[in-house]
Amino acid sequence: MEVPSPPREGRLQPTLVLATLSAAFGSAFQYGYNIAVVNTPHKVLKSFYNDTYFARHGTPMGEKRTLLLWSCTVAVFPLGGLLGSLLVGGLVDKCGRKGTLLINNIFAIVPAILMGVSKVAKAFELIILSRVLLGVCAGISYSALPMYLGELAPKNLRGTLGTMTEVFVIVGVFLAQIFSLQAILGNPTGWPVLLALTGVPALLQLLSLPFFPESPRYTLIQRGDEDAARQALRKLRGWADVEDEIAEMRVEDAAERAEGRLSVLNLFTFRPLRWQLISIIVLMAGQQLSGVNAINYYADTIYASAGVAAAHSQYVTVGAGVVNIVMTGVSAGTVEWLGRRLLLLVGYGICGSACLVLTLALLFQSAVSGLSYLGVICVFSYIAGHSIGPSPVPSVVRTEIFLQSSRPAAFMVDGAVHWLTNCIVGFMFPSVQEAIGAYSFIPFAGICLLTAVYIYVVIPETKGQTFVEINRVFAKRNGVEIPELEEEATDAEPHASPPAKETSF
C-alpha cells in the first residue's frame, strides 16, 4: 500500500501569477482609476461643461447648475457600483468567475470610447452616462474578482492573492493621480485621453484572460466537470498530483449539497450563516464608514491650513498615494504571516487614533503653531492604517467565510453594503462637516472602535484553513452542527455521492 505524501504548500507558479495580474489589472484597476481620475482636473471638466452649455444656449451655465451637474458626475459612479453589485450573483453563477470578468469589460470599453469623443461631440452628457457604466463595471469587478482569485489560490496563498483586489485599486488611484497632473493630461487638451485610458486595461484583459483557467471550484462544484477542474489545478499548481485539493473540493461539494443553493433572501433567514452574514456587513460598512472617503475629501483643506499652496497640493496627494501603495503592499506581504485579525485590528486602531488626533489638531491649530503640520501627519497616518487592514483584508475574509453555494448571494449583499455606505458618506459628510466642523471626525473614531471590538469578539483567524474548516468554526457560533463529510466525500466517485441526510445544517 502506498503511503500518501504530505500535502504540499502552494507556490506562486507563473500561471497563477499571470492569471492574477490579468484579472486584477483589468478589473480592480478600473475601480481605483475611475474613483480618482476626475478629482484633480475637476476645474478643467467643469469649464468644458460650461463652454458646451454656452455654445448651445448662448448663456453661461451658472454656478449652481455647474455644481449640480458635477455632483451628478461624481455621484452616479457609486450608484452604478450598487447596480453592478446586484447583478454579480447571477453572472458568476451562469457565466463563471472568469466569464463574468470578461463580459464586464464591455462596461469599461464602451464608456472609454464615449468619454474619448465627448469633447469632439461637445456632449458632457456622454461623460455622465459613462460614469454610470464605469460604476457598473466597478461594482461587478469588486465582487467577482476576489471570488475568482480566492478560488484560484492554494490555501496558504489565499490571503496574499485576496489582497490583490485592493492593491490594484490603489495602483489605479495612484496612476490616475499621476496622469491627471496638469503637466501631463489634467489640462484642457489632454483630459479626453485621460478619461479614455480606462479602456486600455480592459482590452489587455480581453486579450490575455481567456488563456488562463476558470475557477477550479466553480468548474467542479457548479459545472460538475472534475476532469477540467483537475487540469486547471495542474496548471495553477505546477504539479500533476492534485488529488488532495480535489478531495477537499468534494468535501465542500458535499457540504453544499447539504446546504443547498441560497438566494439573497434565503441568506438572511438561514441560521447556519447568520454570523458570517453579519460579519461581512460589519466589515464592509466599517471599511467605508470609518471615514476613508471623508479624509480624502478634507485632505486639500488640511494641506492648505499647513501652508501648502493650492498648486502644490496635487503633489502632496501623489505622496499620499505612494504611502497607500507601500502600506497595501506591506499588508499583502504579511497577511499570511500575521493573519487577518491582527492586520484588521492594528489598522482600525491607527485609523481611530488618527481621527481623534486630527480633531484636536484642527480645533487648536489657530492657537498653537505647528499643529497644522500635525494634521497632515494624521492624514498620512490614517491612510497608512487603512491600507494595512480595513482596505485590503475584507476582500480576503469575505471569500473565506462562505462556501461555494452561498458565496454569490453573500457577495451581492456585501457589494450592496459597500456601495450604499460609500454613497452615504459621500452625500452626508460635506453637510456634517459644515455643521460641526472638526468634530465631524469623532464619529469615524467611534466606528473604528466598534468595528475593531466586533472583529476581536466574533471573527476567527482564517489563515491556512480550508473553506470547510472555517465553516465549522462559524457553525459553533451559529449553534448548528455540520455533518462529518470528509470520508464519504473523499471516497465517493465524482458527483455520485448519495443524497445528503437531513441535518440541522
Image (spheres, helix red, strand yellow):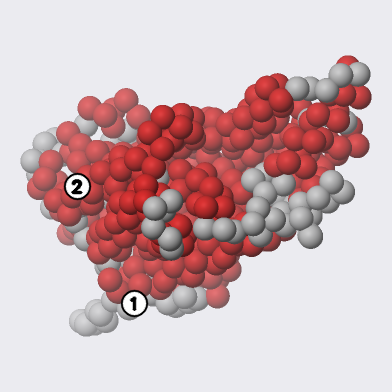
- Name the one closer to the observer, 505 or 42: 42
Look at label 2 and name its amino acid.
Answer: Tyr
Q: Quadrant of residue 192?
A: top right
Residue under label 2:
454
Residue 42 coordinates in the image, percent (x, y): 70, 42
Name which residue lies at 76% across and 52% down: 186
**In screen coordinates, is 150 left or right of 452?**
right
Q: Earlier in the sequence, mark 1 or mark 2?
A: 1
Quadrant of the image for the C terminus? Answer: top left
Q: Quadrant of residue 136?
A: top right
User: Of circles 1 and 2, which is in front?
Assistant: 2
Name which residue lies at 37% across and 39% down: 440
Name which residue lies at 83% across and 23% down: 60
Q: Residue furthest front?
A: 367
Q: Is residue 230 visible?
A: no
Residue under label 1:
9
Placement of 321 over or under 220, stated as above or below: below
Q: Secondary structure at mark 1?
A: loop
Quadrant of the image for the N terminus? Answer: bottom left
Residue 353 coordinates in the image, percent (x, y): 29, 56
Q: Residues within 10 Å of mark 1 (few under 14, many from 20)?
A: few
- Name the one closer to the observer, 263 or 50: 50
Q: Secondary structure at mark 2?
A: helix
Residue 263 coordinates in the image, percent (x, y): 35, 30
**In screen coordinates, is 461 left or right of 192?**
left
Q: Residues within 10 Å of mark 2 (few under 14, many from 20)?
A: some
Look at label 1 and name its amino acid.
Answer: Glu
